């Protein structure tokens, strides 16, 4: 039953991609029309935003299903320093927009991982720090030896610590948050036996990842 349920989840998520793409495409075409009044434009824009959120949610569920079904078996030597640098560059616009005080201390650290999952792991943690970080607050990132530490300033959790990695549990009302980002992080860590720990101290939310079991020489 469990295997059938996993297969159903994967198949459903896959099949949803096409109708969602059609909805988004039609809504984008409507937005280009010159005959719509302001109310109609607002309605179509709401449809497009909702479809985009649903698409992101569907992609996240599909990724979780693929991880659980061991569909990311291909591995290679990954330099986490390079991945981290690229992800920070990708998020620079958001970091600047929210005026974070960003401090990064990173050195070459190589692991044996699937390249897609390595990027998703680090991307989700950085995005989590940005989305949940206090405006004009701090983001601190440290990568050395076999540990990655990502911290952001913010208010204490309003949910129990042991629930933060569970599906759809969110510590925010942000509509752009799917509630799946940290579950994906947890799934990837479990997949590679990466130890993950969370602490809140000195007004900083900190996630620490230990890559000891998959570390290799660069």
Image: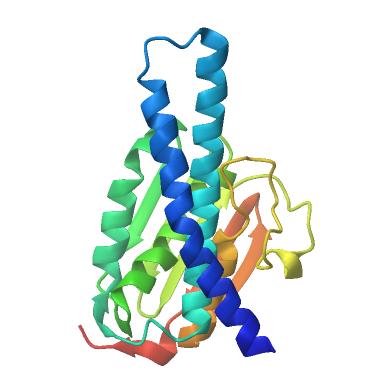
* Residue 129 location (% of width, % of height): 52, 51
Residue at (50%, 88%) from the top-left corner? 193
Which residue is at a point 54% across and 19% down the rendered structure image?
42
State whether residue 186 is above or below residue 120: below
| Left or right position of 95 against 82 | right
- Which quadrant is the C terminus positioned in? bottom left
Task: Out of 41 and 194, give the one closest to the viewer.
Answer: 41
Q: Residue at x 37, y 17 (%)?
A: 33
**Residue at figure coordinates x 65%, y 67% from the top left:** 165
| Horizontal side of residue 159 vs 97, given as left or right | right
Quarter placement of the N terminus: bottom right
> Given the current orientation, which residue lies at the most extreme left position?
218
Quadrant of the image occupied by residue 77: bottom left
Q: In this picture, is 184 found above or below 137? A: below
Q: Is residue 88 left or right of residue 195?
A: left
Q: Position of residue 68 (x, y in %)?
A: 53, 82
Q: Position of residue 135 (x, y in %)?
A: 55, 34
In percent of width and height, residue 99 lies at 44, 32
123 or 205, nearer to the observer: 123
Instruction: Kindly indicate the quadrant of the structure image that contains residue 97.
Output: top left
């Amino acid at each position: 039953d469990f295997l059938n349920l996993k297969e159903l989840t994967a198949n459903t998520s896959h099949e949803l991609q096409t109708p969602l793409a059609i909805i988004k495409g039609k809504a984008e075409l409507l937005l280009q029309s010159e005959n719509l009044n302001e109310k109609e434009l607002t309605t179509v824009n709401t449809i497009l935003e909702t479809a985009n959120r649903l698409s992101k949610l569907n992609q996240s569920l599909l990724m979780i299903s693929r991880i659980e079904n061991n569909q990311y078996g291909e591995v290679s030597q990954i330099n986490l320093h390079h991945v981290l640098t690229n992800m920070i560059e990708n998020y620079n616009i958001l970091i600047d927009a929210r005026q974070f005080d960003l401090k990064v201390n990173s050195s070459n650290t190589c692991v044996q991982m699937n390249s897609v999952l390595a990027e998703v792991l680090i991307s989700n943690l950085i995005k989590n720090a940005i989305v949940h970080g206090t405006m004009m607050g701090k983001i601190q990132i440290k990568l050395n030896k076999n540990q990655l530490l990502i911290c952001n300033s913010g208010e204490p959790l309003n949910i129990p610590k042991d629930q933060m990695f569970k599906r759809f549990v969110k510590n925010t009302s942000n509509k752009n948050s799917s509630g799946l980002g940290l579950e994906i992080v947890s799934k990837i860590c479990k997949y590679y036996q990466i130890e993950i720990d969370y602490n809140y101290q000195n007004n900083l939310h900190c996630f620490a990842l230990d890559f000891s079991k998959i570390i290799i020489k660069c």
